[in-house]
Amino acid sequence: MNKMLILAFGFMFLTANVFVAVKDDRIAVKGIRPMGMGGAFVAVSDDENAVFYNPAGITQRKSWLLGIFSLGAAINTETISVVSDAMDVLDDKGNGSGGDDGLSVASLEKAKAKISGKDIDATINLPNFSFISSPINIGKNSFSFGLVNFIYADIGANLKIDLPQYAFELAKIVEKNPSDFSDKDIVAALPPDILKELGSDLPIEQLIQDLHRIEQGGAAAQTALDEILDSLDQDARDLITALESGDKSFEDVINEFENKLGEDLMNKILGDIGATIAIKTYITETFNAPLAYKFTDLSTIKLPGEMSVGINLKYIYRIKAVETISLNAKAFSELEDSFDSLNLAVLSGSGFGIDLGTIYHWTPEWNFGLQISDIFTRINYNNVYLKYPETLQDSAFTESAYISPQFNIGAAYVPENIYKWKTNNRFTFALDMRDIFGAYENEFGNKIHLGAEYRLSPFALRLGLNKFRPSFGFGIELGGFQLMYAFYGDQSQLGRQLGMDKTVYYHEFLLAVKLGHHDGRPFGEDANPEYLAKEKAKSDEEARIAAEKQAEKARIQAEKAAEKGKLSAMTPEEKKAYLDQKALDEKAAKEAQKAKIAAEKQALKEKAAAEKQAKAEEKAKLDAQKQAAKEAAATTPSVK
């Protein structure tokens, strides 16, 4: 019962953030090496990226790591295409009715087709510092620690343009004759299919038809009048009253109704035209202190292999602007200054968090990892900056936000051989399932990460699937310099913010100065010294046996050649006597060998029988001792 209460209290403490704070976006650092491997790194984690994937992994290093400088950048392919397409659209400037400052209708159509809904997303990793210690031996076990400071700026925006096709048709009509076009003319000039589309939303068109029926008189006129009176607003009723009183002619009323149709049409057009802008921009600094301990003997829990456990303590400072702004042309037309109503909040704040991790080193080839990220991670935003109508700071503003914990598992395999090919431990294969319980990812496909890496110093090649989207990368490491590149697909977070499910692809680059970056999880000749020594001994033994066989073959061939020469010099009688004697000698040798083998088998049999007899005697002796002890205990009076 006590254990259940402790577990329940712990769960409440873990989830308390949910009830007292708003949910914040997770830290978006991915790491260029992991992303080249499809984001599969939970059970690999042997460099500075361990602070984001699994702090327990730093115990795998054979020596220290010092990152003096790193500068990276990532940009998605849609950003590149948006810039190119925007320049293409601007090249059409002046081709439309607006003169040198206007855009043609064709340009607007091109903007919607090529720019609307695309992500503008770029990340810059500012110069960062990292240090991971060499393993510090504590008896048979070891301890590792580190310090990693990481700063990145992620700037993202997505513009979704809402322009119905009929709006383009109207714009084309206006573009042909921009100098003098009334609302009534627009209605008259609309193609029948467009007018029919609008008619379903504009009952005023039916009113105009009914007015024509009234003008024609008769019973149909009274029916039309009844329909009008049942459906009109007050302005239209006033027109009918003026018509009945004779204050206005049928022509005047029809003309005003047509003008009203034009106004309603424009209201509909303006209501259907708009844009939605998703903004997701972060500047984040994390200061991380990973600590890890490695147990080399698991016999007490009856498990083979070794176990590493780790914790990452982190401080976070973040500036963010995350907004979805919907702009509507009708609402804009009714504002004296449209931008007065737009507030873009830019928040800044800081907080602390904890990540936990463990790696089970089952064999030198297999790792199994578990990470629980962002336990108790909370950011307290205490400043807000508002743009429009002017920049101001609200020092009284506070908002507490939490980053939801994520449970991530992974496996990594470093084969010594692939079939008959000795890989020399240069391959790493990894598989992750991240965010198992759906704190941020609900679709199964977006939880899966699969990757591989091949290292042949100074080069590294990487390949993978990130959320079932392709990725690859490479790295060059010369002395203390690193140059890396990765290309990978990911789900668009800006698209998700706008309710779209889409994939975007990123190019990422990194230039770094690091010392000790070769000394991560050992690979190549350093991967498994015991295995390599065993393989060398095996190879030497195979070479010795092959040499002995070759020597024996040469000896036999030499004896045969000598015997052939000896037989050629004999008379037939001598040759027959020699061969007969040789056959008798060979037969005797075989009998002697057979007797020797039989004697060895008999000796082994007798030895086994003797050992069995000895065990039986020992067992009988122990049984007798136990019986004597039992009888002695039975006859000894108890002491109260």
Image: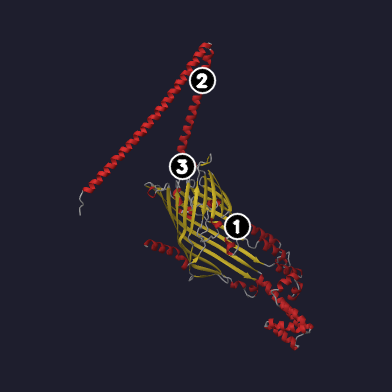
Residue at the image position 72 percent from the left and 65 percent from the top: 105
Based on the displayed image, in which of its 4 quarters is residue 183 positioned? bottom right
Check disc 3: other Cα within 10 Å, few if <14, some if 14-19, many if 20+. some
**Where does label 3 land, which residue?**
528
**Where does label 2 land, which residue?**
558
Q: Amino acid at mark 2?
A: Ala
Identify the mark at residue 572; answer none if there is no mark: none
Give the mark, 3 or 1, whose residue is nearer the N terminus: 1
Of marks 2 and 3, the one in the foreground: 2
Quadrant where the image shows the C terminus: bottom left
Residue 242, given in percent of the width and then of the height, sits at 73, 86
**Across the whole image, how many numbered discs are drawn on residues?**
3
Check disc 1: other Cα within 10 Å, few if <14, some if 14-19, many if 20+. some
**Where does label 1 land, which residue?**
504
Can residue 104 be seen from the camera position used here?
A: no
Residue 269, given in percent of the width and then of the height, sits at 68, 72
Quadrant where the image shows the N terminus: bottom left
The answer for how far apart the CA atoms under marks 3 and 1 are is: 40 Å
Residue 235, given in percent of the width and then of the height, sits at 69, 83
| Left or right of residue 116, residue 133 in this image | left
Camera-side residue of 601 and 315 = 601
Of marks 2 and 1, the one in the foreground: 2
Camera-side residue of 327 and 427 = 427
Q: Amino acid at mark 3?
A: Asn
The answer for how far apart the CA atoms under marks 2 and 1 are is: 75 Å
Q: Are marks 2 and 1 in contact (CB under 8 Å)?
A: no
Q: Amino acid at mark 1?
A: Val
Q: Are marks 2 and 3 in contact (CB under 8 Å)?
A: no
Q: Which type of secondary structure does the marked residue at label 2 adopt? A: helix
Residue at the image position 76 percent from the left and 74 percent from the top: 188
Image: 165 above or below 557? below
